[in-house]
Each structure stands twice: as C-alpha cells, then as structure tokens.
Image: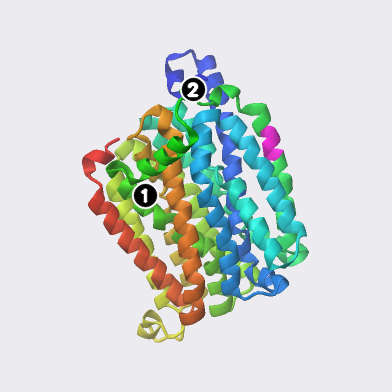
C-alpha cells in the first residue's frame, strides 16, 4: 500500500487518490473503535435499570462490567501477535464477528450469568478495535506523522461515547437497555461489511514467521517491561482506567444518586466530557507534531485530571469545598465542568502510543501497541474492580479520591522512568 507520507511528491490528483486509499480504510477501522467505546460505556447511563433487571446491586454490576475489561486485556497479546502475523483485515473481520455474537447475547440473555458471559464475549471481540487502525497507521506512516493520525483515530473512536451519552440515555429511557445492545449488533455487521470492501489484503504483516506463537507472545510482555516502554505502560495502566470508570459507570451514578439529577440530565452533564475525549486527541496530535514535549504534556495533563477528581469529591455533600463555600453541596454544573476538564486532560492518551511506536522495529509494531493497550485495559479491569468495594464501603466520593491518587502515583512514576531524549519526535 502506498504510504500517505509519500503522497506529497506525487501529482495533485494522484496524491489525493492515494490519501483516500489510505484514509478510507483507516477511518473505517476507527469505526470499530467507536463501536467498542459505545459498548463499554453503554452501562454508564443505564446502570440502575440494568442492575434492577438483573437483580444485582450497583457494586455487583461494576464487577460484572469489569469482566469486559479483563477479557479485553487478556486478548491484547494474541491480537498483537495476530496483527503482525496475519494482517489487519483478517483480524478485524474476526473481531467484528465476535462482537456481533456478544451484542446479541447481551440483548437476549437474562440474569447476571448471561450478562457476565456477554460482557466477556464483547471484551474479547472489542480488544483489537483500536489496535487494528493503529497498527495499519504505524506500518504505513512515518513516526512523525503517526502521532497526528493516532490522535485522529482515537478521536473518531471516542465519538462512540457520544452515542452512549444523551442519545443512548433517551433510547434506554424509551426502549430499554437491551435495545442498545441490539442496535450495536447491527452496527457491527455494517462496519464489518465496510472493512471487507475497503481494507486491502496488502495491510497484512510481511515479516518472516519463523518465531513460534509462544515466543512472539512473550515478546509483547518483554516490550512492555523494557526500560524504553516501562514508564509509558505504567501511566497507561491508570490513564484509561480513570476516564472510563467515570464515563462508563461512576460519573452517571454520582450525578443521579448524589446530585439527584435525572438520567437524561446525567447524560447531558457527561456530554462535555465525551466531546473533550473526541476532539482532544486530534488537537493533541496536531500540537504534538508541531511542538512535541510529550513527556511534559502527559505528566501535567494526568496531574490535572487527578485534581479534577479530587474537586468533584470535595464538592459533594459535606465535602471540604462545599463547606468552604457555605453550601450543602456544589451544583451539578460544577461536576459537569470538572468532568469536562478531566476529559480534556485524559485526551492526551494517544501520545502514549506514539511514544511506544518510536522505540520498536517495524515488524514489532503490533506487539508494542498491544503492550500499551494491554496496560490500558488491564488497568481498567483491575481498578474498576477495586471501585465497587470502595463505593460500597466508603461511598462514591471515595472512588473519586482513589482514582485521583492512582493517577498522581502513576504520573510521578512516568516522569521518573522516562527521559526527555527518549520522547523526542
């Protein structure tokens, strides 16, 4: 496939054509990441009705939805190996088939066990939806352009959270939460057809397959633990987990149970956060290509995100910020503003992929990106599983404080384990 990086030297019409031939498959694959975000955040605006339908408590539901992240994390290593071995097209189509099955299960089966099974299947199916377009871009683009395009991919993918905000809140309110999963199954089939039509077989890996699957899988782990990538992996462990815990579950529960707003109002309050996660990665990608400073940007944005979570907790009933202002609690508008800043800060996440991309050989790109993505979703699985017991024992405000502390700790480790020269563009 012709690289988009090579189109500048070609005549105008040919350059546009080659840019389209690259951009169309990439954006179609990014729709898979959009669907993944829709599926993982859908419970956030329907947590109460899902829990009531399944006859479980909110903290038990948090554990059930956490199974999605465990399955997602478990799939990172085999998917990373498969992308380098068999190519983006075949891997992507396989994943869409699994997602379709999982969404149908979620829409049809009953009980906590059925929902748990559906979450596991969906986690397996969605585990490579971000890796597929990222791997295609990394194998086709120069390192300088990858930061920009990785932001574009993440921005398009994060638009799935727009669908699970107010639109999904309306759908759940009028047609039930199972309808959302049924609609997702239809979207999976549609995007799979687009992948079949647009993603060329030339996108597959071309390296020799002398290494065994076991050795290649262990290589993913070695890359993630290597000195060059270790700091990136540590920050990735908390970065996605904090954002998805708020967007997928606790943000909506906090607004509805603590601030006593309706489901639709909670969806509207979370919408600015979602918009920041959609537009932010693209803006960070543009800024990164022009200015750089990835290490400073990532450290400062994650500390800012931690501060916003502390502010939300402090503005709750009887919180220190509320008492300082002479109020029982701060209004929901304050939480919406804090969540907006949180989303804008955590939107810097694609820079972690860009940092990992520059330290590996081209034939190991899929494995390197898988190591970072594994950290993203292992962190989400582990930390979200911790939030349920914390909320049950100490309240939802304690969840905000816990996530804030983890962000500060991992941002500090990241700053200590990386060097400015290592992050140079």
Residue at numbered disc 2: 206
Disc 2 to disc 1, C-alpha distance = 27 Å
Count residues near mark 2 (Cα–Cα under 10 Å), then give few for <14, some for 14-19, many for 20+.
Answer: few
Residue at numbered disc 1: 233
Where residue 33 sits in the image (x, y, percent)?
Answer: 57, 44
Disc nearest the viewer among 2 and 1: 2
Q: Residue at x 52, y 72 (%)?
A: 388
Where residue 101 sits in the image (x, y, percent)?
Answer: 71, 48
Q: Residue at x 70, y 70 (%)?
A: 54
Residue 30 — which label?
A: none
In the drawing, does residue 91 fall left or right of residue 113? left
In the drawing, does residue 354 fall left or right of residue 152? left
User: What SS does tag 1 mark?
Assistant: helix
Q: Looking at the image, how many numbered discs can be counted on the residues?
A: 2
Looking at the picture, the colour scheme in use is rainbow
Query: Residue 8 falls in which quadrant of the image?
Result: top left
**Of callouts 2 and 1, which one flags the residue occurring earlier in the amino acid sequence?**
2
Q: Report if the CB atoms under discs 2 and 1 are less than 8 Å apart.
A: no
Q: Residue at x 68, y 67 (%)?
A: 112
State whether residue 307 appears in this view: no
Query: Residue 177 falls in which quadrant of the image?
Result: bottom right
> Which residues lie in the magenta part?
190-194
Of residues 143 and 385, the one drawn nearer to the viewer in this rendering? 385
Where residue 291 sits in the image (x, y, percent)?
Answer: 30, 39
State whether residue 305 appears in this view: yes
The answer to whether residue 102 is above or below residue 210 is below
Q: Is residue 42 magenta?
A: no
Of residues 421 and 202, the one drawn nearer to the viewer in this rendering? 202
Of residues 186 and 203, the one drawn nearer to the viewer in this rendering? 203
Count residues near mark 1 (Cα–Cα under 10 Å), then give few for <14, some for 14-19, many for 20+.
Answer: many
């Amino acid at each position: 496939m012709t690289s988009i990086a090579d189109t500048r030297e070609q005549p105008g019409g040919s350059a546009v054509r080659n840019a389209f031939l690259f951009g169309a498959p990439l954006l179609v694959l990014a729709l898979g990441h959009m669907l993944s975000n829709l599926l993982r955040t859908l419970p956030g605006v329907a947590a109460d009705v899902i829990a009531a339908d399944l006859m479980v408590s909110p903290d038990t539901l948090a554990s059930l939805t956490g199974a999605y992240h465990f399955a997602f994390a478990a799939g990172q290593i085999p998917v990373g190996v498969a992308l380098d071995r068999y190519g983006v097209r075949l891997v992507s189509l396989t994943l869409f088939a699994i997602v379709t099955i999982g969404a149908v299960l979620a829409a049809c089966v009953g009980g906590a066990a059925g929902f748990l099974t559906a979450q596991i299947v969906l986690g397996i199916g969605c585990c490579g939806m971000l890796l597929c377009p990222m791997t295609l871009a990394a194998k086709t683009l120069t390192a300088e352009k990858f930061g920009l395009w990785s932001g574009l991919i993440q921005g398009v993918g994060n638009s799935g959270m727009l669908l699970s905000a107010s639109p999904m809140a309306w759908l759940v309110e009028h047609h039930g939460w199972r309808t959302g999963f049924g609609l997702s199954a239809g979207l999976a089939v549609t995007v799979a057809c687009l992948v079949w039509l647009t993603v060329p077989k030339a996108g597959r890996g071309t390296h020799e397959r002398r290494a065994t699957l076991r050795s290649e899988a262990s290589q993913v782990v070695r890359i993630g633990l290597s000195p060059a990538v270790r700091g990136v992996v540590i920050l990735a462990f908390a970065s996605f987990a904090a954002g998805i815990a708020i967007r997928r579950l606790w943000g909506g529960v906090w607004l509805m149970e603590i601030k006593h707003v309706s489901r639709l109002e909670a969806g509207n309050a979370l919408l600015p956060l979602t918009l920041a996660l959609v537009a932010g990665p693209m803006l960070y990608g543009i800024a990164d290509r022009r200015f750089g400073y990835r290490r400073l940007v990532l450290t400062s944005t994650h500390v800012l995100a931690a501060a916003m979570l502390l502010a939300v907790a402090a503005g709750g009933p009887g919180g220190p910020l509320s008492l300082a202002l002479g109020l029982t609690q701060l209004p929901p508008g304050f939480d919406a503003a804090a969540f907006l800043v949180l989303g804008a800060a955590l939107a810097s996440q694609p820079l972690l992929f860009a940092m990992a991309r520059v330290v590996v050989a081209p034939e190991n790109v899929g494995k390197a990106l898988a190591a970072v993505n594994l950290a993203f979703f292992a962190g989400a699985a582990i930390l979200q599983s911790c939030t349920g017991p914390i909320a049950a024992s100490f309240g939802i405000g304690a969840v905000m404080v816990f996530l804030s502390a983890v962000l500060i700790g991992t941002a500090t480790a990241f700053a200590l384990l990386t060097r400015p020269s290592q992050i140079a563009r």
